[in-house]
Image: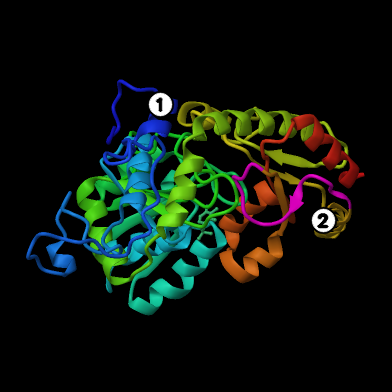
Amino acid sequence: MQRANSKFGLMTTAIHAGETPDPTTGASAPPLHMSSTFVTDQVAGFSAHNLEDDGNFLYARWGNPTVQMLEQKMAALEGVEDCICLASGMAAATAIFLTFLSAGDHAVISDVSYAGVAELARDTLPRFGINISLVDMSDLAAVAAALRPNTKLVHTESPVNPIGRLTDLAAVSKLAHDAGALVSCDATFASPLGQKSAALGIDLIMHSVTKYVGGHGDAVGGAVAGRKALISQIRGESAIHHGGVMSPFNAWLVARGLSLLPMRMRAHQSGAQAISEWLEAQPQVTRVIYPGLTSHPQYDLAQNQMSNTSGMVSFQVGDATIGRKIAQQMIDRLEIVHYAVSLGHHRSLIFWMETQGLMDSSFRLSGTQLESYRSYAGDGVFRMSVGLEDPEDLIRDLSGALS
Ligand SMILES: *Cc1c(COP(=O)(O)O)cnc(C)c1O
């Protein structure tokens, strides 16, 4: 089973896409091909310009069968033609920016994003002569106003790290396409099951597969999914020339995790719903942001756009002094939840993200953009990635650290 096929459900697709029993051994489970080069019976060129769709394997920077298995699973789940897996989520973001933007081009980029992507956009792209506008993607008038004749890419992230604000993906895609730009979305928080990004118009769907897709906190990787012509362009530039390819071992681990993604996402969602409702009832907690709560400022958009509201909950406990104190209590007292960055794993993780620190280091916002951020985050948020432990145990653990 190679490609997305509407005949199959999500679990069947996650388990079987990209896999075939080994023709020589009959092995039912997918093999791990730790091979950097491949014996060929063709006298062919060795250049990115000789890259042929569905050609034979040649060298692992072009493609590797185990990595390709994961790429086919991702493409099938996203309902698109193709996918490329790279060394990390940051390699995937870099691939999108450096493949589709050149000196003199303009890009509209979400004013809030994963911090690494924020710094890449602000610090690196201008060095290469790429102009950027940072825009609150929940403000459609601001997106429209930022578009220019030389805008080549609109990059958003939904839900956005670390505040859980959403982008209306269909509306932003339409604005971008009417202006002749490609639109990319970092869908890491949503996972491939959280929203039908391609059907909503997204051309380039990006994931840090380190998070929900792998789901076990053991392998770092990234992916970009989309139309074959766009993914081939990324393969030529970012894999073959920039070289940030995924190791076959990581692909094998991530594919094993991905096989159970539909089951895991259902459990992440129900655990996060229970925990966010419990948090809303706690006197120490001043604000909870979760797309599954009716109190989320974009609850209606979440209902329309998201098929799974995922496991990322953000909450406030008061000003920065109180936040820092509770963070220390968490470090000292939590028994189950790990006080650590990252997300999407079966283990629950929590981390305090102070607004002023993030503004200074990464986002550097002012005016209405800072106001919008603070309306979600106040002086800072605890970003909790609700794992797959029993919700009652997580609630008991949090309760002991909050009081
Ligand atoms: C983690 C993350 C990234 C970066 O991914 P790495 O695999 O750590 O390089 C990018 N975007 C989002 C939303 C993330 O959570």
Residue 157 visible to the viewer: no
Look at 39% across and 64% down and name the residue there. Answer: 94
Quadrant housing residue 321: bottom right
Three-letter code for the amino acid on which mark 1 is drawn: Thr
Image vertical order of residue 148 relative to residue 310, above or below: below
Q: Is residue 343 magenta?
A: yes
**Mark 1 and mark 2: span between their CA atoms?**
41 Å
* Side of 384 relative to 210 (left or right): right
To which residue does mark 2 refer? 327
Q: Residue 287 or 403: which is nearer the viewer?
A: 403
Point out residue 111 in the picture as x, y percentages from the top left corner: 51, 58
The magenta segment: 333-346
Circle 1 residue? 12
- Please state if 357 lies on the left or on the right of 135 as rendered: right
**Percent of width and height locating residue 10:** 42, 27
Relative depth, front residue between 39 and 118: 39
**In-image side of 55 versus 68 (left or right):** left
Residue sitting farthest toward the bottom: 127
